Amino acid sequence: MYSEMETDMSRDDSGQEPDWDTAVDLQLAPAAIIHALFWSAGSVHTGWESCVQHDLVVFEISAIDDHSDNHCRLAEQEYVEDPSEEVTWHDWSVELKLGRVYVSAHWRAGLHDSLAEWDWCAEESEKAFAAAAVLVGKRVRKGLAVEAEPNRRPVPRTHH
C-alpha cells in the first residue's frame, strides 16, 4: 500500500532511478532559513534588493547557482553608523538570494573589539555561508590563512 505522498506523485515504473540532475522543487520560507541557518546572527532581515553596499566591502565571496540567478554571498563591510560616533564597525553579512527574495544575516564587531569577538563573528558567518551555499547547489571548503599581527614597536636587536 502506498502512502498518500506516493500516490500524489507521478511514479516512473521503468525501474530506473531518477537522474542526479533531475530538478526538485522545494518551498522554503525566509523564517525557516533564518531559524535553521542564521540563528546566531546579531540581526537578520529580508528584502527585495541587496543591503550590501559595494563601496563599503573589504572582502566578499559568492556561490552562484549554475541554473538561475540565485546566489549566496559572504561580504565583509566596514562603516561608521553615525558620523558623530567614533566606532567603526566590521560587518560580516551572509546574503542568500532565492528568486526575488533576499534573506540577509549580519554579525558585527567594532574595529577595536577583541580578537575573540572578531574570530567568533568570522567563524559563525563562515559556517552560515557554507550551509546556505548548499541551497544554490555549491559546497564550500575552508582554506588556511596565516595572519601575523602587525609589529607596532621596534624590534630590539639582540646578540646571542
Image (cartoon, rainbow, N blue to C red):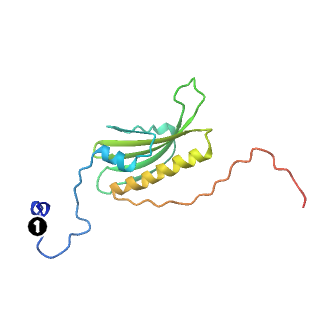
- Residue 136: % across, % down: 34, 55
Mark 1 secondary-structure assignment: loop
The answer to which image quadrant residue 87 occupies is top right
- Residue 111: % across, % down: 60, 38
Horizontal arrangement in the rendering, residue 135 relative to residue 91 (left or right)? left
Q: Is residue 8 above or below residue 88?
A: below
- Taking the view exactly as shown, the residue that stands out farthest to the right is 159
Horizontal arrangement in the rendering, residue 27 relative to residue 158 (left or right)? left
- Residue 91: % across, % down: 50, 40
Q: Nearer the viewer, residue 154 or 125?
A: 125
Q: Quadrant of the N terminus?
A: bottom left
Horizontal arrangement in the rendering, residue 153 relative to residue 52 (left or right)? right
- Taking the view exactly as shown, the residue that stands out farthest to the bottom is 15
Residue corresponding to mark 1: 2
Which residue corresponds to the image point at 45% horizontal and 54% vertical from the top-left? 127
Label 1 is placed on what type of residue? Tyr
Which residue corresponds to the image point at 61% horizontal and 46% vertical from the top-left? 115
